[in-house]
Image (cartoon, rainbow, N blue to C red):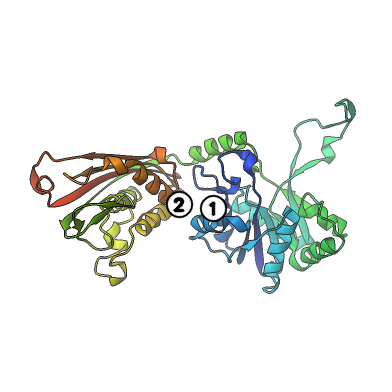
Amino acid sequence: MAGTVAAVVVAAGRGLRAGGGVPKQYRLMPGGTAIERSLATFSIHGEVTLVQPVIHRDDQDTFQRFSSTFRSLPPVFGGATRQDSVRSGLEALAGRKPDIVLIHDAARPFASPSLITRAIAAAVQSGAAVPVLPLADTVKTVDAQGRVTGTLDRSLLRAVQTPQAFAFAAIADAHRRAQKAARDDFTDDAALAEWAGMTVSTFAGEAGNVKLTTPEDFLRAEATSLSELGDIRTGFGTDVHQFTDGDHIWLGGVKIPHVRGVTGHSDADVVLHSLVDAILGAISDGDIGVHFPPSDPQWRGASSDQFLAFAVERVRARGGLIAHLDITVVCEAPRVGPHRDAMRARIAEIAGVSPERVAIKATTSEKMGFTGRGEGIVAFANATVRLPWRD
């Protein structure tokens, strides 16, 4: 029996050479960021009880934005090296005394549930085990001038992945010993375990369990993710609110000065409300009134960005992504054009997409109807989402 199984998900590195302007674990790609996918894989696994993220101190706000829906412990901060970060995660778990711990790099977001199951079984059997793949290429040694000095027997070589699995007490003790010995040069936890005298076994890794390091890795990962998300759906939403006394309105998460305000529950943001219904419609998950009923006083005056964030998370919980959001606002005033880019940027931020995936258009009703008379404002929205195919 495995007993209590914990996972340390290491996400404290900077990883900027992958491009995108952010640490690679937070770079947006189809199906969610690497940190989201890694946390989700361990959080939903039936044998994993505790998930301990390790993050960089500067990434607290970013981490919270991408982790709020997952079953994980509060994050702890990593150190100057990966080895320091792993030890931080292990020490955070020490008081809970798990039997088995899986140590995984968040930059490997495609680890499968079956790989985790094999890791746990291997740790139970041997106390220390790593996933490996045989090498397909010939491997040679070279000197400082780049000249070949030998050819290695690739039948004896393996490429090592994560999650690496250990008896918790043994690997935690090995990390403490390495710290006392001022050894911080181990490239993975298996190497540290070997130094500490542990016998490390192997189990079958997965070719798809790639580590995201370079921009080319992300291009391949994005292609793989999109191929998994072939169920393309569209949803439609609309919302209307009446003008009343006031000096501003909220549109697309942006406060816009105006000679009047609007009535309605929450902040009466017709753009965000219509988007919520469009997204929920695309995944057949009710509407804004079902999840945030106007009769519930807790939503009175609430900011509508939380409603949109909720709808987006419902898509992510299904393993999907937002492909495009398209909104049309109908009113005589205020003018939407001067605020269009700010609205696109705010919606993109909430939805976790690039602004290029958000379109906002505005028109009048040529003085006809209630919008033409300046009595109210309307928004129409279409949402395109991609989901995994399911029977």
Q: Nearer the viewer, residue 5 or 61?
A: 61
Which residue sits at x=33%, y=51%?
254
- Can residue 326 be seen? no
In the rendered view, tell whether residue 215 sits above or below residue 321.
above
- Can residue 86 be seen? yes
Q: CA distance from mark 1 to mark 2?
A: 9 Å
**Circles 1 and 2: CB distance less than 8 Å?**
yes
- The dot on residue 316 is 2
Farthest residue toward the right? 149
Dot 1 falls on a residue whose secondary structure is helix
Farthest residue toward the bottom? 95
Residue 39 on image: x %, y %:
57, 56
Residue under pointer 1? 36
Please indicate whether residue 191 sits to the left or right of residue 114 in the image.
right
Residue 98 on image: x %, y %:
69, 70
Dot 2 falls on a residue whose secondary structure is helix
Mark 1 is surrounded, within 10 Å at the Cα level, by few (under 14), some (14 to 19) or many (20 or more) other residues, namely many
Residue type (three-letter) at the residue carrying disc 2: Arg
Q: Which image quarter is the N terminus in?
A: bottom right
Which residue sits at x=78%, y=58%?
128
Please indicate whether residue 247 sits to the left or right of residue 235 in the image.
left
In the rendered view, tell whether residue 95 sits above or below residue 256.
below
Q: Nearer the viewer, residue 148 or 305?
A: 305
